[in-house]
Amino acid sequence: MENFEFCNPTRIIFGKREVDRAGQAAASLGSRVLLVTGSASAKKSGLLDRVKGSIEAAGARVWLLDGVVPNPRLSKVREGIELCREVGVDLLCALGGGSVMDTAKAVAAGAVMDRDIWEVFQGRAEITGALPVMTIPTLAASGSEMNGFMVITNEESGHKLAAGSPHVYPKISILDPELTYTVPRNHTAYGGVDAVCHLMEPYFNGPSPHTPVQDGLAESLMRSIMDAAASCLDRPEDYDARADMMWAATLALNGLTRAGVGDHPFPVHLVEHAVSAIFDVAHGAGLAALLPGWMAWRVHLGNGAKIVQFGRNVMGISMSGDEAADGLFAARAFASWLKEMECPASLSDLGIKAEDHPRIAENAQYQAAIWGITDLYSKEAMIELLSFCQSGL
Amino acid sequence: MENFEFCNPTRIIFGKREVDRAGQAAASLGSRVLLVTGSASAKKSGLLDRVKGSIEAAGARVWLLDGVVPNPRLSKVREGIELCREVGVDLLCALGGGSVMDTAKAVAAGAVMDRDIWEVFQGRAEITGALPVMTIPTLAASGSEMNGFMVITNEESGHKLAAGSPHVYPKISILDPELTYTVPRNHTAYGGVDAVCHLMEPYFNGPSPHTPVQDGLAESLMRSIMDAAASCLDRPEDYDARADMMWAATLALNGLTRAGVGDHPFPVHLVEHAVSAIFDVAHGAGLAALLPGWMAWRVHLGNGAKIVQFGRNVMGISMSGDEAADGLFAARAFASWLKEMECPASLSDLGIKAEDHPRIAENAQYQAAIWGITDLYSKEAMIELLSFCQSGL
């Protein structure tokens, strides 16, 4: 186990109808609230009014930043920052999925910075403070409700980049599983893939050779998410399944399973951010298209031991003892699960062609350079990886 | 899954030689430090001087509260509270095991209270604030380094009671596995039993019928602790084994596996506190003496389903499908593990006799009344339970 620091101060309020405590929670943090949300669903369902009403009833004033889209745009973040400064916002409240939460975090940090927030994503500036953020997720997927990360797309430069800071951990997150009953079938599945992938990245890429505690936790959460995702597709209004999915997805990227595995890249996320920056596909769909090929590529490189372990302990398959064969078997078993979840399992399933690989690899190089991992993930290595992801296993 | 709130703000600094960051960590919290420790081992090994030196080098003044004993005494807590007030302490630093950490927490809360700290344990007063606490555990067991609980023995009344408050979460805990290399063989094993039991109490006693996420995490941590404890006995200076044991034991009682299982008692701890209040045995030894019998008692009562699940998923045994037989089999398998760890596995192994049961049950009733669970754990029920624990399975 590698040395580590761990501190996750987010207060979670979890459960049925806890969304009605939004006003009480907000009142403990601020009184001039920017409510950040998406384009349509929270408005149509009445959820936006319910949350706005709760916050106003608790005595706060509310401004709205709506229209946040998947692969959330830098321009919207800048709009939010201006609004915060103009009206003197003292609390961000995100009501939506990962895009909405990440936008709220970027606004919260950007509003108190002298420099442009995009410089943080480029690795040229650091976050030294932020307005408090509260989140009310409506999708189980990103884990953004209990971590200090955010991903924003600069639609002008065509880059989708990640950044993080202890200052943008939500102070309070209200997780009400009933809010996810209406998530469409495909996005329910994509959310499960995203959460499983959050567990896979440190599990497969941590440098420490001895991490049984972390592995056990990650494997257990992967099984929970895969089981819950299947139940959610079968029975969208099964409270227990939605609750399991929501809590496991939160724990999947709150630092728990990463602590002690050592510094590690998030290569599948890295490449997916390039895919969705260029093709504007849903993040979870992009991950699904890459994951089986990524596993097969690792096996091809002779790094299949952990993929075999995943096959045995998560997919529950018996192994022959031959690492290459077993690793490929594990990757195929995962691809089968993706297909059962009606997800893409290759780049061709997304309509992406082999001729697109160089520009995906080039785009991903931009983030790889910021992360300082171009030695591991050169353009050539990425193109090889993409070739394994092109046609499915 | 039941509704819950979760917030654990403790900052963990984990790893090899991180103890040398004690001064830097302390300086971020205070400048007049009461260093709380035990009677001998940290002094003899030079660890006390190492930590004291680190804190003083960072510019703080240090006072010492030493001589804390296992089953830590209320009189020592009161001595610490007086010292804090006298010299104006602004930070408690605990260097030792659960007893030392719990003493530091009780002093931290008591020093800023008008009323006597024992009233908190009696359920007659509430903690409304505390001096900041930092811990440097030297034993993997109690989990006190990352939670808001403490257990103190009133040596005059002969009661060992537990209390908790969000105010006594350590601000920082430095977990350096090398500090546990010198823990004696028996206390290494008792620590493992204590940590496993912290996972078992919510796992076996949570009221929610649907907790696969929590069960999976608990089962995974139980397996990790049982594996690591065996390795620590075999190779006391195996860094990886000590590190696994330390981190898993911390996660075992930091709220992670309890969140969502619903309100639940800690019955084995409840009865053990009575045992060690009367007989002054090590807490982990007392738990070991009770656990197999407690499982058998639950099976006898027809509540064996979760014990069967434990047998299958943690002990890895195949089941026949008959709950009573399988449950007893699981309890016996756990008793075998305890014996391999050279732990007691029955009350008679501790020299306790059947004629002692009534006064153990009476003593435990005192805490049960404070917890409001005398309906579940009447004196008669406890005596029946103790009869299952008397002679081993």
Image (cartoon, coloured by chain):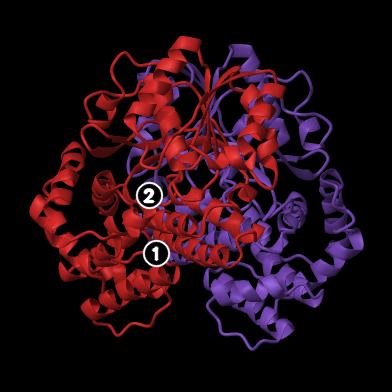
Chain colours: A red, B purple
| Res A369 visible | yes
Q: Quadrant of residue B343?
A: bottom right
| Image height of A310 relative to A247, above or below | below
Pick the front one: A376 or B244? A376
Residue at position x 71%, y 71% in the image: B295
| Residue B387 position by quadrant | bottom right
Badge 1 is on which residue? A343
x and y percentages locating residue B384 in the rendered image: 85, 69
Question: Is B279 positioned to the left or the right of B235 in the image?
Answer: right
Disc 2 target residue: A258
In depth, the one of A344 and B220 nearer the eye is A344
Is residue B126 toward the left or the right of residue B47 in the image?
Answer: right
For the residues beneath circles 1 and 2, the answer to whether they share a chain is yes
Q: Is residue A313 left or right of residue B150?
A: left
Element under label 2? loop
In this rendering, the count of numbered labels is 2
Residue A221, image x and y in percent? 48, 60
Mark 2 or mark 1, which is nearer the start of the sequence? Answer: 2
Helix, strand or loop at mark 1: loop
Q: Is residue B39 above or below residue A36?
A: below
Residue type at numbered disc 1: Cys
Give B102 or A137, whichever is nearer the viewer. A137
